[in-house]
Image: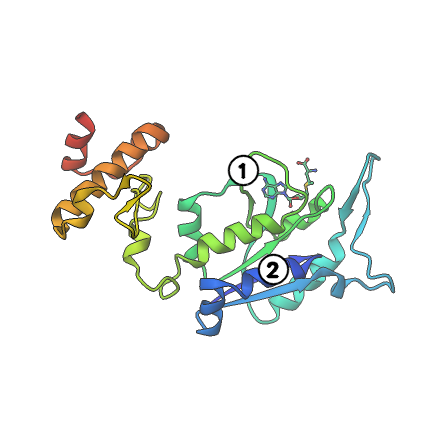
Amino acid sequence: MKKFHVFTIFPQFFEGFINTGIVSRAVKNGIIQINTVNLRDYATDKHRTVDDVVYGGGPGMLLKPEPIFRAYEEILKNSKPYVLITEPWGRKFDQAFAQELSQKDEILIICGRYEGVDERVKSIVDEEVSIGDFVLSGGEPAALVIMDAVIRLIPGVVGDSDSLRADSFSDGLLGYPNYTRPPVFKGMEVPEILRSGNHKLIEIWRRWKQIENTLKKRPELLKQAKLSETDRKILQY
Ligand code: SAM
Protein backbone atom coordinates (compact mmCIF):
# COMPACT_ATOMS: atom_id res chain seq x y z
CA MET A 1 0.00 0.00 0.00
CA LYS A 2 1.30 3.41 -1.00
CA LYS A 3 0.00 6.44 0.79
CA PHE A 4 -0.27 10.02 -0.39
CA HIS A 5 -1.03 12.94 1.91
CA VAL A 6 -1.88 16.29 0.33
CA PHE A 7 -1.87 19.53 2.32
CA THR A 8 -4.20 22.01 0.66
CA ILE A 9 -6.68 24.76 1.41
CA PHE A 10 -8.92 23.37 -1.38
CA PRO A 11 -9.47 19.65 -0.65
CA GLN A 12 -12.49 19.62 -3.01
CA PHE A 13 -10.01 20.04 -5.86
CA PHE A 14 -9.02 16.37 -5.48
CA GLU A 15 -12.49 14.79 -5.31
CA GLY A 16 -12.91 14.17 -9.05
CA PHE A 17 -9.38 12.80 -9.26
CA ILE A 18 -9.83 10.34 -6.41
CA ASN A 19 -13.20 9.15 -7.76
CA THR A 20 -12.22 8.67 -11.40
CA GLY A 21 -10.68 5.92 -13.53
CA ILE A 22 -7.58 4.00 -12.51
CA VAL A 23 -7.00 6.14 -9.41
CA SER A 24 -10.42 5.33 -8.01
CA ARG A 25 -9.90 1.63 -8.82
CA ALA A 26 -6.50 1.65 -7.10
CA VAL A 27 -8.07 3.19 -4.00
CA LYS A 28 -10.94 0.68 -3.99
CA ASN A 29 -8.50 -2.22 -4.47
CA GLY A 30 -6.45 -1.04 -1.49
CA ILE A 31 -3.29 -0.42 -3.57
CA ILE A 32 -3.12 3.27 -2.70
CA GLN A 33 -4.59 5.63 -0.16
CA ILE A 34 -5.00 9.39 -0.68
CA ASN A 35 -5.41 11.52 2.42
CA THR A 36 -6.32 15.12 1.58
CA VAL A 37 -5.72 17.38 4.56
CA ASN A 38 -7.56 20.68 4.77
CA LEU A 39 -5.05 23.08 6.31
CA ARG A 40 -7.95 25.12 7.70
CA ASP A 41 -8.63 22.22 10.08
CA TYR A 42 -5.25 23.02 11.67
CA ALA A 43 -5.84 26.76 12.10
CA THR A 44 -6.61 27.78 15.66
CA ASP A 45 -8.59 31.02 15.33
CA LYS A 46 -12.34 31.18 14.80
CA HIS A 47 -11.95 32.31 11.16
CA ARG A 48 -9.67 29.31 10.47
CA THR A 49 -7.01 31.60 9.04
CA VAL A 50 -4.27 29.92 7.00
CA ASP A 51 -2.65 32.96 5.36
CA ASP A 52 -1.07 36.25 6.36
CA VAL A 53 0.65 39.31 4.85
CA VAL A 54 4.21 39.12 3.54
CA TYR A 55 7.05 40.51 5.67
CA GLY A 56 8.84 43.31 3.85
CA GLY A 57 5.67 44.41 2.11
CA GLY A 58 4.42 43.71 -1.36
CA PRO A 59 1.22 42.34 -2.79
CA GLY A 60 -0.56 39.12 -1.88
CA MET A 61 -0.66 36.76 1.06
CA LEU A 62 1.41 33.79 2.16
CA LEU A 63 0.43 30.43 3.69
CA LYS A 64 1.32 30.54 7.37
CA PRO A 65 3.71 27.96 8.82
CA GLU A 66 1.74 26.96 11.94
CA PRO A 67 -1.18 25.02 10.33
CA ILE A 68 1.27 23.20 8.05
CA PHE A 69 3.55 22.20 10.96
CA ARG A 70 0.56 21.12 13.07
CA ALA A 71 -0.81 18.94 10.26
CA TYR A 72 2.66 17.48 9.66
CA GLU A 73 3.19 16.68 13.33
CA GLU A 74 -0.12 14.84 13.33
CA ILE A 75 1.10 12.63 10.46
CA LEU A 76 4.49 12.08 12.16
CA LYS A 77 2.68 10.34 15.02
CA ASN A 78 2.14 7.38 12.66
CA SER A 79 4.71 7.63 9.87
CA LYS A 80 7.44 9.66 8.19
CA PRO A 81 6.48 10.48 4.60
CA TYR A 82 8.78 11.80 1.88
CA VAL A 83 7.84 15.48 1.73
CA LEU A 84 7.42 17.46 -1.49
CA ILE A 85 6.37 21.06 -1.87
CA THR A 86 5.12 22.50 -5.16
CA GLU A 87 7.23 25.44 -6.31
CA PRO A 88 7.74 26.96 -9.78
CA TRP A 89 11.50 26.94 -9.12
CA GLY A 90 11.60 23.33 -7.90
CA ARG A 91 13.20 20.30 -9.52
CA LYS A 92 11.50 19.79 -12.89
CA PHE A 93 9.04 16.90 -12.74
CA ASP A 94 9.60 14.22 -15.38
CA GLN A 95 9.19 10.49 -15.87
CA ALA A 96 12.48 9.68 -14.11
CA PHE A 97 11.36 11.71 -11.09
CA ALA A 98 7.97 9.91 -11.19
CA GLN A 99 9.82 6.55 -11.24
CA GLU A 100 11.85 7.59 -8.17
CA LEU A 101 8.74 8.66 -6.30
CA SER A 102 6.92 5.43 -7.18
CA GLN A 103 9.52 3.63 -5.01
CA LYS A 104 8.56 5.63 -1.89
CA ASP A 105 6.03 4.12 0.49
CA GLU A 106 4.53 7.38 1.64
CA ILE A 107 4.57 10.83 0.06
CA LEU A 108 3.30 14.15 1.35
CA ILE A 109 2.70 17.01 -1.08
CA ILE A 110 2.33 20.52 0.29
CA CYS A 111 0.35 22.76 -2.10
CA GLY A 112 1.25 26.44 -2.05
CA ARG A 113 -1.31 29.18 -2.73
CA TYR A 114 -1.31 32.96 -3.03
CA GLU A 115 2.32 34.20 -3.10
CA GLY A 116 3.43 30.81 -1.81
CA VAL A 117 4.39 29.36 1.56
CA ASP A 118 6.41 30.79 4.47
CA GLU A 119 10.03 29.77 3.77
CA ARG A 120 10.42 28.12 7.21
CA VAL A 121 8.14 25.31 6.01
CA LYS A 122 11.08 24.20 3.86
CA SER A 123 12.73 22.79 7.01
CA ILE A 124 10.36 19.77 6.77
CA VAL A 125 10.61 19.43 2.97
CA ASP A 126 12.75 16.82 1.17
CA GLU A 127 12.34 18.28 -2.34
CA GLU A 128 10.76 21.24 -4.09
CA VAL A 129 9.01 20.19 -7.29
CA SER A 130 7.89 22.11 -10.36
CA ILE A 131 5.72 20.81 -13.19
CA GLY A 132 7.13 23.34 -15.67
CA ASP A 133 8.37 26.84 -16.29
CA PHE A 134 5.06 28.65 -15.80
CA VAL A 135 3.17 29.97 -12.79
CA LEU A 136 -0.02 28.31 -11.55
CA SER A 137 -2.39 29.93 -9.05
CA GLY A 138 -1.77 27.08 -6.65
CA GLY A 139 0.04 23.80 -6.14
CA GLU A 140 -3.10 21.67 -6.48
CA PRO A 141 -2.92 21.09 -10.26
CA ALA A 142 0.77 20.24 -9.82
CA ALA A 143 -0.04 17.75 -7.03
CA LEU A 144 -2.63 16.10 -9.31
CA VAL A 145 -0.10 15.79 -12.12
CA ILE A 146 2.54 14.34 -9.81
CA MET A 147 0.19 11.85 -8.15
CA ASP A 148 -1.30 10.71 -11.45
CA ALA A 149 2.09 10.06 -13.03
CA VAL A 150 3.36 8.24 -9.91
CA ILE A 151 0.22 6.20 -9.26
CA ARG A 152 0.19 4.61 -12.73
CA LEU A 153 3.73 3.31 -12.10
CA ILE A 154 2.76 1.49 -8.91
CA PRO A 155 2.54 -2.27 -9.58
CA GLY A 156 -1.05 -3.45 -9.95
CA VAL A 157 -2.53 -0.05 -10.77
CA VAL A 158 -2.43 -0.29 -14.57
CA GLY A 159 -3.89 -3.69 -15.51
CA ASP A 160 -1.48 -4.47 -18.37
CA SER A 161 2.06 -3.52 -17.33
CA ASP A 162 3.19 -3.90 -20.99
CA SER A 163 1.37 -0.64 -21.70
CA LEU A 164 3.68 1.13 -19.22
CA ARG A 165 6.77 -0.15 -21.01
CA ALA A 166 5.44 1.27 -24.30
CA ASP A 167 4.64 4.66 -22.77
CA SER A 168 6.55 7.74 -23.85
CA PHE A 169 9.70 8.39 -21.76
CA SER A 170 9.68 4.96 -20.09
CA ASP A 171 12.94 4.07 -21.89
CA GLY A 172 13.79 7.61 -22.93
CA LEU A 173 11.92 7.58 -26.26
CA LEU A 174 8.51 8.92 -27.24
CA GLY A 175 5.71 6.41 -27.82
CA TYR A 176 4.47 5.05 -31.15
CA PRO A 177 1.18 5.95 -32.90
CA ASN A 178 -1.87 3.74 -32.31
CA TYR A 179 -5.08 3.07 -34.22
CA THR A 180 -8.41 1.43 -33.45
CA ARG A 181 -11.33 0.40 -35.67
CA PRO A 182 -12.52 1.16 -38.33
CA PRO A 183 -9.64 0.13 -40.62
CA VAL A 184 -10.43 3.00 -43.00
CA PHE A 185 -11.84 6.30 -41.77
CA LYS A 186 -12.50 9.23 -44.10
CA GLY A 187 -10.03 7.73 -46.56
CA MET A 188 -7.29 7.36 -43.88
CA GLU A 189 -6.04 3.79 -43.55
CA VAL A 190 -4.62 1.92 -40.58
CA PRO A 191 -1.08 0.82 -41.62
CA GLU A 192 -1.16 -2.63 -43.22
CA ILE A 193 1.47 -4.07 -40.84
CA LEU A 194 -0.71 -3.44 -37.79
CA ARG A 195 -3.47 -5.56 -39.38
CA SER A 196 -1.11 -8.31 -40.51
CA GLY A 197 -1.16 -10.27 -37.27
CA ASN A 198 2.65 -10.63 -37.56
CA HIS A 199 3.73 -9.67 -34.07
CA LYS A 200 7.43 -9.63 -34.77
CA LEU A 201 6.92 -7.19 -37.66
CA ILE A 202 4.54 -5.09 -35.58
CA GLU A 203 7.15 -4.87 -32.82
CA ILE A 204 9.80 -3.67 -35.30
CA TRP A 205 7.39 -1.16 -36.89
CA ARG A 206 6.51 0.27 -33.48
CA ARG A 207 10.14 0.63 -32.45
CA TRP A 208 10.85 2.30 -35.78
CA LYS A 209 8.00 4.74 -35.19
CA GLN A 210 9.21 5.48 -31.62
CA ILE A 211 12.63 6.41 -32.97
CA GLU A 212 11.17 8.41 -35.87
CA ASN A 213 8.75 10.23 -33.55
CA THR A 214 11.53 11.09 -31.10
CA LEU A 215 13.87 12.22 -33.86
CA LYS A 216 11.21 14.53 -35.32
CA LYS A 217 9.70 15.93 -32.12
CA ARG A 218 12.27 15.66 -29.32
CA PRO A 219 15.69 14.85 -30.86
CA GLU A 220 17.53 15.87 -27.68
CA LEU A 221 16.01 12.82 -25.91
CA LEU A 222 17.97 10.44 -28.12
CA LYS A 223 21.21 11.36 -26.36
CA GLN A 224 19.98 9.85 -23.08
CA ALA A 225 17.76 7.05 -24.45
CA LYS A 226 18.58 3.37 -23.96
CA LEU A 227 19.19 2.27 -27.57
CA SER A 228 19.98 -1.24 -28.82
CA GLU A 229 22.22 -2.04 -31.80
CA THR A 230 19.10 -2.42 -33.98
CA ASP A 231 17.80 0.95 -32.74
CA ARG A 232 21.08 2.56 -33.79
CA LYS A 233 20.80 1.00 -37.25
CA ILE A 234 17.26 2.37 -37.60
CA LEU A 235 18.58 5.79 -36.60
CA GLN A 236 21.13 5.73 -39.40
CA TYR A 237 18.37 5.52 -42.05
N1 SAM B 1 5.40 33.85 -5.79
C1 SAM B 1 5.67 32.71 -6.59
C2 SAM B 1 6.83 33.00 -7.55
O1 SAM B 1 7.55 33.95 -7.31
O2 SAM B 1 7.04 32.25 -8.50
C3 SAM B 1 4.42 32.23 -7.33
C4 SAM B 1 3.38 31.70 -6.41
S1 SAM B 1 2.13 30.84 -7.25
C5 SAM B 1 0.99 32.09 -7.67
C6 SAM B 1 1.28 29.97 -5.97
C7 SAM B 1 1.70 28.55 -5.76
O3 SAM B 1 1.40 27.78 -6.90
C8 SAM B 1 3.16 28.29 -5.50
O4 SAM B 1 3.50 28.55 -4.17
C9 SAM B 1 3.30 26.84 -5.85
O5 SAM B 1 2.90 26.01 -4.79
C10 SAM B 1 2.29 26.68 -6.97
N2 SAM B 1 2.91 26.70 -8.30
C11 SAM B 1 2.89 27.70 -9.19
N3 SAM B 1 3.53 27.38 -10.31
C12 SAM B 1 3.96 26.11 -10.16
C13 SAM B 1 4.70 25.21 -10.97
N4 SAM B 1 5.11 25.53 -12.18
N5 SAM B 1 4.96 23.98 -10.49
C14 SAM B 1 4.56 23.62 -9.25
N6 SAM B 1 3.86 24.44 -8.44
C15 SAM B 1 3.56 25.66 -8.87
Residue 90 can be seen, yes or no:
yes
Badge 2 amino acid: Phe
* Residue 211 location (% of width, % of height): 26, 35
Distance from the alpha carbon under mark 2 to that under mark 1: 20 Å
Q: Which residue is at the front of the view, 58 or 145? A: 145
- What residue do we see at 20% from left, 47% from top? 194
The response on whether ligand 1 sits within 8 Å of label 1 is: yes
Quadrant, the N terminus? bottom left
State which mark lies toward you, 2 or 1: 2
**What residue is drawn where x is 83% and y is 35%?**
56
On the rendered structure, is 25 left or right of 52?
left
Where residue 141 appears, as percent x and y from the top left, is 59, 49
Residue 39 is drawn in which quadrant?
Answer: bottom right
Q: Residue 188: x percent and y percent?
A: 29, 39
Q: Residue at x 52, y 40 (%)?
A: 91
The quadrant of the picture occupied by the C terminus is: top left
Q: Element type at marker 1?
A: loop
Residue 14, label in figure: 2
Helix, strand, or loop for circle 2? Answer: helix
